Image (cartoon, rainbow, N blue to C red):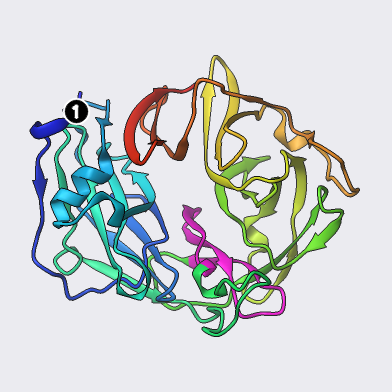
Amino acid sequence: MAQSGDTTTLERRSESGVQLKSASALAFAPGGVLLVGDGLGGRVYAYETGDTTRHGDSDVQIEDLTGKIAALLGTTSDQIRVPDLAVNPDSGAVYLAVARGAGADAEHLILKAEPSGRITELDLDATPHTIVALVDQPDAEKVDRRGNALRTDTITDLGYVDGKVVVAGLSNEEFASTLRAIPYPFTASTKGAAIEIWHGAHGQYETNAPIRTFISYEFDGKPEILASYTCTPLVRIAVDALTPGAKVMGTTIAELGNMNRPLDMIAYRKDGQDFILMANSNRGVMKVHADGLGEYGPITHKIAATHGVPYDTIEGLQGVRRLDKLTDTTALAMVATGEALNLTTIALP
């Protein structure tokens, strides 16, 4: 088990020439390749970490993560944000997207937390990498109805799916909600596909709300995107429909409750049954029953509450902000406890 307190090892390298404008989403491609979505910079990086050896201990427990990161970076905990994490499936090491400071002056970097508790910074210059620039990033001056810059949602999530890096977020198109399917290894970027959905809780079609989190999921042997949006529709989107410039209609198979933002999802199998675990801003952690997921028909009408795929709320999991699988039976959770963030290993419920 990883140690907390003074036994945690912290290591920082010198400044890198690679300057991320943001690190809004992390994921892994095969072979220990770390994908980093820089939404503000309009780029996706693929870092060949070489981190492919499995660590002996798969139980991660790091208390006061923000305090330890602050000590590493020579600042205070209130200056630290951790927008995302990803577990390297090859090694079990945890990679963290970290921002030091706020606004345009924030420093964005990637840290690695090993099961032993050792925290180091990934040298972005020294790590072999390739970059693809997005061609459809929202215009810098565009804002939503609340005055928030649309560019901050250029990349809301990303993942490796069937030989492609799928990037969710907003574009500069009329239908702003976008999924970009970029072949990997990177050669050149292409326009994304515009995504339209029926949002049952709102009783309307939506084309400008971004996907907040997604996973890849097979239906009848073919990969699809299973995506969740604010307020919380669960939507199927066929990967083979994500051609450049296409307009794609997603299939809404569940409405999981309004006044909520989904934060992260993982899929797993337990006792011969399939489940999806979803962390949320206001509705706790949901255990979605995924057996027969392909049998749920589309929601095409306005609904008053929840509808479609059933779920349970896991009352014992509170304050979960991010999730990723560690093993077939455990997951890593980033948990907010008061002002602190902790990394903890949980048994899959």
- Residue at 61 percent of width and 80 percent of height: 172
Q: Check the image and report above or below for 99 versus 259.
A: below
Q: Any magenta on residue 63? A: no
Q: Secondary structure at mark 1?
A: loop
Q: Check the image and report above or below for 160 versus 295.
A: below
The N terminus lies in which quarter of the figure?
top left
Residue bounds of the magenta highlight: 153-182
Residue 125 x, y percent position in the rendering: 17, 69
Q: Amino acid at mark 1?
A: Ala
Q: Check the image and report above or below for 239 versus 6.
A: below
Residue 60 sits in quarter: top left
Residue 317 x, y percent position in the rendering: 49, 25
- Residue at 49 percent of width and 29 percent of height: 318
Residue 260 x, y percent position in the rendering: 65, 45
The residue at which mark 1 appears reads as 2
Q: Which of 22 and 271 lies nearest the eye of the viewer?
A: 22
Locate residue 195 relative to residue 74 in the image: left or right. Answer: right
- Residue at 34 percent of width and 54 percent of height: 81
- Residue at 50 percent of width and 20 percent of height: 316
Q: Which of 199 and 126 lies nearest the eye of the viewer?
A: 199
Locate residue 242 relative to residue 163 in the image: left or right. Answer: right
